[in-house]
Image (cartoon, rainbow, N blue to C red):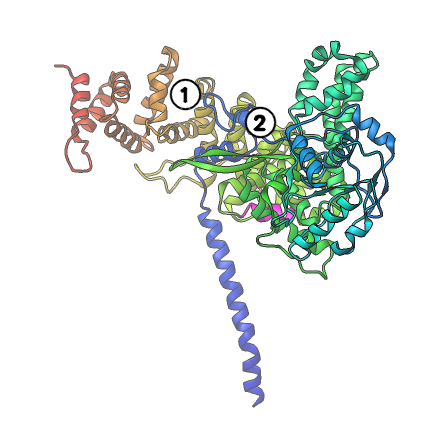
Amino acid sequence: MSQEEAAAGAAKPADEAAQDGEQKKQEEATEAQEQPRQEAWAARRDLIAHAPDFVSTLVNRDQFGQTGGTHYGNQIFHIGGGAETPRTVSGGPIPQTDVEELEAVFQDCPSFDDALARLRTDRIVFLSGGHETGRRSAALMLLHRLGTDRMLSLGHPESFEILPDQLDASTGHILCNLAISRSRPLREPHLLALSEQLKRSSAYLVITVEPSAAVGDISCIRWEPPPAEEMLHAHVARITGETVWPQLCGLTPVKEFLTRQHRPDDIKQFAQRLIAFHRGETDEEDLAAHGETAVANQISRWLTEAKPELRDKAFLISLAVFDKAPYAVTAELSDGLFVRLQKIEDPAVPPRIPVFGSSRDERLRLARAKGYATTEVTEWGPLKGKYCAAFRDERTARLLLAEVWNLHPSARPALADWIRKLAEDRRPLVRTRAASAAALLATADLSSALGHLIEPWADARSSHSWLTAANALTMAQLLDVPTVFPILRDWCTGENESRRWTAVRAYGLLGPVHHQEILEALLDAIPRQSPVQDSPEGEDEEIPEEARQFADALKLLLLAVREPVLAELVKRLNTNHAAHAYALLAFREACHQSKDDGSGRPLVLDWYAHADTATAQHLVLFWEALLGDRAHNTQALDILRGWVLKADADPESEAALALLLCALVTEPTNHLRVSHLLETTRDSEGARPPVAQRLLRRLSPT
C-alpha cells in the first residue's frame, strides 16, 4: 500500500467522525430552534395529576390529586415485649425472664390459636411472616402455653439432615429465619425425621420462615398478629391500669401513631412515653415528636445495616420518589438505581437482577408500605385496577431522600444520575416525579440540588428539561424552600434564555398560591422584554417564543386565580402599553382552553356564564379589545366561530354565548363583525348550523 493510500485510509474515519459530529451539532441546533413545548395548561394539569400530594395546594377551584383517607390492610405489628433483634446462629438457652416479660403483654389472635393447635398435635409448626412481625415472640409463647419449662434457640444447621441431632429431650426449640430456597429445599424426608425425633424426645419445635421461602408442600401458618392498638394497650394498661386507657388512647398523638406501622421496639418505646405523659413527666408535644423519631431511626437502619440488600435499598429509595404511584413503575425504575449504586459499591461485580425473583408483598412489607387498587384518570378516560404502593407513614419519603442525600454522599452521583434519567422518560408521571425528587432534595440541601439537577435541566437545550426545572422550582417553593423566589427573579430578568423560560413557567405554575407577588413580578419583567410585534392578521409566527411564555404565565394566572388577576389586567389595558399586548395575548389563549371535565365547554365562556356583574364587564372589555386589535381580530373571530359550533349541542353554552354576543354588539363595528360571523359560519358538512340562526335572531330581533 502506498503512503498516499494509507493516508487516505487513515483520513477516512476522521472525516466520518467529523461528519457525524457536525450532523449531531445540526440536530441539536434544530432541536433548540424547534423547542417543542407542552402547552402551559396541559403542563399544569400533568403537574397536579402526577406530583406528590403537597402539589394539591396549586389547585384553586377544582379538586385534583388523591384525597385523604384511611387504609385498612394487613398491618403487621409485633405483639411481644421488645424488639425482635437479630440472633446469632449459635443458638442457646432462652432466659426465663424473657418469657415472663413477654407473657405480661402478649395478646392472642386467630393465627396464634391455629399455630398452637398445630403444635400440640404435630409437635412442629412453621410460622411464615416478615421481619419484625412478632414471629419469635409468638414462638416463645406457643412453647410456654404448652407448659415447656426449658426453651432452646437453635442455630442454623449446615444441612437439614443434622437438624434432628440438635434436639434435646423435653425441650421447646425455636429456629428463627430458616433459610429455605429452591437451591436449598426442605424435603419431606427431612420433615419426617424431625417429627419422629420430636415425638421420641417429647420435644416441640417452632420454625419461622420468610413469606418468600420455598416451602413447597410443607404446611405453614401465616402469622397475622392483632392490631397495634392491642399491643400498645397491653404495654400501657399493665402499668397505668385499665381505667385511664380510654383517655390515653383518645389523644391525637396516639391516634396518629396507631395509623402507621412501627417496629416492635418503637411501639414499646412509645408506650413508655405514654406512661410518662400520664405521670406528668412529659407533654403532648414530646409524645407527638416520637413518631418522626421512630421513622428516622427506621430509615437509618434500612440504609446502614447489611439487611436489606442493596437492591432492596434501591427499591426503598425509588418508592420514596414514586410514593402513591403504580407499584410496577416503582419496581421497574428501582433496578436502574440499583445498577448505578452497585457500580459505586463494587465496580468489579456486575449487578445481578433476578427477573422473577421479587415478591411484591414482601417488598411492601419490608418498606412498611401498603398496596391498593385505584382508578387512574387519563385524557382517554378512567383506567381501573391500577395497583399503587405508598408508605404507611407519609413522612417516610421526605426523610428517606433527605438522609440518602445528606448522610450518604457516596450515593449522590448514582442518585443524581438516576433522577436525570427519569427526567428523560416519555411518561409524564416519571418526569414529574423526577422534578418532585429534586424539590425534596432541595429541602435537604438547596445548593447541591441546584448544582446536580435543577440548573443542568434549566441550561439544557430541550424545553422538556426546562419544564422539569420549572416544576422542580415550583414544588420547592411549595415546600417552603428559602430563596426560590430570589432565584426566579434573577433568572426571569437575566440574560440566559432557557433560565428565563424556566422562571416564567414556574411563575405561571405558582400563580394560584402567590398570585399577587407573581403577577407583580411578571408585569415588572415585561417592559424589559422585546415588545410583542403586530403580526399579519391570523398569523402567530412573528410572536417570539419568550413572549409566548410570558403570555402563557399570565394565562395560567388568569384561569387558575380568575377574578383578582382579571381585574388587575383590565387596569393595564389602557395604562401600560407593554402589558397591554401581553394581556391580550394571554386572554386570547385562555379563550382556546376547554374545561377538563370532559364536556369540551370553553372555559372562559363557562366563566362568563357564572360571573357576577363586575367580572362579566371585565370579560366583555377584553373581548372588545381583542376584536378592535388588528393583531388579534381574525383569531378572536375564529374563536367565536368555534364557540358557536360547540354551542349547537350545548344549550347552556348557547345561552351564555347569546348574552356575551349581545354585550359585544353595542358598538356598530362589532355588530357588523358578529352578524357577518353568524351568517357565514358553516359546520363540517358546509351547512349553516341552526344555532347560528338562533343567535343572529337574538342580535337582530326585528
Identified by mark 1, the residue type is Asn
Q: Amino acid under label 2?
A: Tyr
Q: Nearer the viewer, residue 94 or 494?
A: 94
Residue range in magenta is 415-424
| Spatial CA span between label 1 and label 2 | 59 Å
Residue that numbered label 1 is attached to? 574
Q: Which residue is mark 2?
A: 72
Q: Residue at x 66, y 35 (%)?
A: 223
- x and y percent of residue 540 in the render? 36, 39
**Residue 508 locus on image (x, y percent):** 50, 30
Label 2, residues with CA under 10 Å away: few <14, some 14-19, many ≥20:
few
Q: Mark 1 against mark 2, which lies toward the viewer?
A: 2
Q: Quadrant of residue 97?
A: top right
Q: In the rendered view, tell whether residue 29 sits above or below residue 252.
A: below
In the rendered structure, the answer to whether residue 556 lies left or right of residue 702 reads right
Residue 467 in picture, x, y percent from top left: 52, 40
Give the structural element (helix, strand or loop) at label 1: loop
Q: Earlier in the sequence, mark 1 or mark 2?
A: 2
